[in-house]
Image (tube, grey):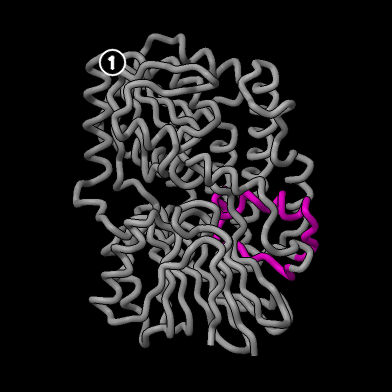
């Protein structure tokens, strides 16, 4: 029986995850994410897939982050008619993430046309809010640990990945083999999310490698956050945190609540300035089965911040001279309200721009963490004089040692392990460790590569 996997994204980079499994009788796409970062990657989002979307029988999602789900509206727009399988929490999050992604694209196209800084005449969004809503009609939800039929002869089981709310490791069973997709693996000792489920067997394995070449370090996240907030407050400055709306924003609220409750930081006002993060925070409280916190703990942590819904209230934060903490999307400073705050706060040395996790190459976040002294926003350059910091330990991704510990749970080696979802140096470093320490057969695939699975 034919069994192939085609790597349509999420290789050579941490974005654009798309893996097509073809059994000869069914085609299943695992994840359907947007490419982000470098322009040459983002241009891939506009190119037609090398296969007809109408020929895909089903999509199975590991989780809701845009680099795993954000191309779904385009897939449906181009003719996909099948079901999209996910956990319930992933669907709840996609209901806010996908329309928001479309809204940001529409706004950016509108702004580019108004101010004339796009090379395209007119600039158009990749997809619209209507396209996003149409894609949501294809979702079918399943609980964790229950096998569900997704296409002819193919079933999927969602196991807890511990990355964000609803995130799953997927066990895909075909007539010829069992393929496991790690998705994005969370951290085993995360205070909010559960430890990733142990997987004992797979014929083939796709494992992420975001932090495949590094460790998060031993320093406690609360200690590091305490130091940054306190020294910024002493300067009379504001801490601006570009944050991923899903997962990271809720973790930050939890840590800030704990620090305030212990009187370890001043009682500064805290603002959650992202409608999407606000919605995601409410969904977090709705799904206590997906995290470690009790309902009361989640409620207290989420209420440490003032929610900023309206755009005018967001703008008013920039002109309030009082020291404060602002959490705003997006986490790599690629869009959203944080861009307007960056234009105001980045030029002032009293302030701190605090990133909270991995910054993909080609993003403003990566450039600022690397020490750039000017950033381009909305077609204009702005000085960067504020302190720049990044709390790597706040990442929702397992580091290299934690990935290796998870792999140790397999009772027998997979026939073949594929390293995905990592920059080239991280993917190759993880390949080397798996080969040397576990003795497994490992491949780092190329973009659009097809592998025949025996």
Residues shaded magenta: 56-82
State how many labels appear: 1
The residue furthest left is: 218
Quarter of the image where one finds residue 57: bottom right
> In which quadrant will I find the N terminus?
bottom right
Quarter of the image where one finds residue 256: top left
Quarter of the image where one finds residue 367: top left
- 1 or 403: nearer the viewer: 1
Secondary structure state at the residue bearing disc 1: loop
**x and y percent of residue 255 in the render?**
34, 40
- Left or right? Give the position of 215 relative to 278: left
**x and y percent of residue 224 in the render?**
23, 38
Viewer can see residue 289:
no
- Left or right? Give the position of 276 relative to 161: right
Q: Tell me which residue sits at (54%, 31%) in the image.
A: 335
As for residue 71 lying within the magenta part, the answer is yes
Q: Tell me which residue sits at (39%, 9%) in the image.
A: 321
Height in image: 156 above or below 203?
above
- 60 or 113: nearer the viewer: 113
- 273 or 365: nearer the viewer: 365
Height in image: 358 above or below 212?
above
As for residue 334 lying within the magenta part, the answer is no
Viewer can see residue 274:
yes
Q: Tell me which residue sits at (48%, 41%) in the image.
A: 38
According to the image, label 1 marks what residue? 349
Residues packed near mark 1 inside 10 Å, few (<14), some (14 to 19) or many (20 plus): some
Height in image: 246 above or below 239?
below
**x and y percent of residue 165 in the render?**
51, 54
- Left or right? Give the position of 28 relative to 243: right
Height in image: 353 above or below 52?
above
């Amino acid at each position: 029986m034919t069994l192939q996997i085609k790597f349509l994204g999420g290789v050579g980079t941490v974005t654009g995850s798309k893996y097509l499994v073809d059994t000869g009788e069914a085609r299943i796409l695992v994840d359907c994410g947007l490419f982000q970062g470098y322009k040459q990657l983002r241009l891939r989002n506009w190119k037609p897939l090398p296969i007809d979307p109408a020929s895909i029988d089903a999509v199975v999602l590991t989780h809701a982050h845009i680099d795993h789900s954000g191309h779904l509206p385009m897939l449906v727009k181009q003719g996909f008619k099948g079901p999209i399988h996910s956990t319930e929490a992933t669907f709840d999050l996609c209901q806010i993430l996908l329309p928001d992604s479309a809204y940001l694209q529409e706004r950016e196209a509108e702004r580019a046309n108004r101010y004339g800084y796009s090379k395209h005449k007119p600039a158009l969004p990749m997809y619209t809010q209507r396209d996003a809503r149409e894609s949501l009609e294809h979702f079918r939800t399943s609980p964790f640990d229950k096998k569900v039929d997704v296409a002819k002869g193919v079933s999927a089981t969602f196991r807890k990945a511990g990355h964000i709310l609803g995130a799953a490791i997927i066990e895909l069973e075909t007539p010829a083999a069992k393929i496991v997709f790690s998705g994005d693996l969370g951290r085993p000792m995360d205070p909010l999310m559960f430890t990733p489920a142990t997987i004992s067997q797979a014929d083939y394995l796709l494992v992420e490698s975001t932090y495949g070449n590094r460790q998060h370090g031993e320093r406690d996240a609360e200690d590091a956050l305490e130091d940054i907030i306190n020294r910024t407050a002493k300067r009379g400055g504001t801490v601006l945190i570009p944050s991923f709306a899903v997962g990271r924003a809720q973790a930050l609220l939890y840590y800030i609540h704990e620090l305030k409750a212990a009187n370890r930081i001043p009682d500064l006002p805290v603002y959650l300035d992202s409608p999407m993060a606000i919605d995601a925070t409410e969904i977090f409280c709705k799904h206590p089965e997906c995290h470690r916190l009790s309902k009361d703990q989640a409620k207290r942590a989420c209420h440490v911040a003032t929610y900023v819904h309206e755009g005018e209230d967001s703008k008013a934060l920039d002109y309030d001279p009082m020291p404060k903490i602002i959490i705003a999307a997006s986490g790599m400073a690629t869009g959203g309200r944080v861009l307007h705050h960056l234009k105001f706060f980045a030029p002032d040395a009293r302030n701190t721009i605090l990133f909270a996790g991995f910054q993909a190459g080609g993003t403003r976040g990566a450039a600022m963490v690397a020490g750039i002294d000017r950033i381009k926003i909305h077609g204009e350059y702005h000085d960067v004089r504020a302190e720049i910091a990044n709390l790597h330990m706040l990442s929702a991704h397992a580091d290299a040692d934690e990935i290796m510990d998870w792999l140790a749970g397999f009772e027998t080696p997979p026939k073949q392990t594929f390293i995905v979802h990592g920059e080239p140096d991280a993917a190759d470093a993880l390949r080397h460790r798996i080969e040397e320490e576990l003795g497994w057969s490992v491949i780092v695939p190329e973009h659009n590569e097809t592998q025949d699975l025996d």
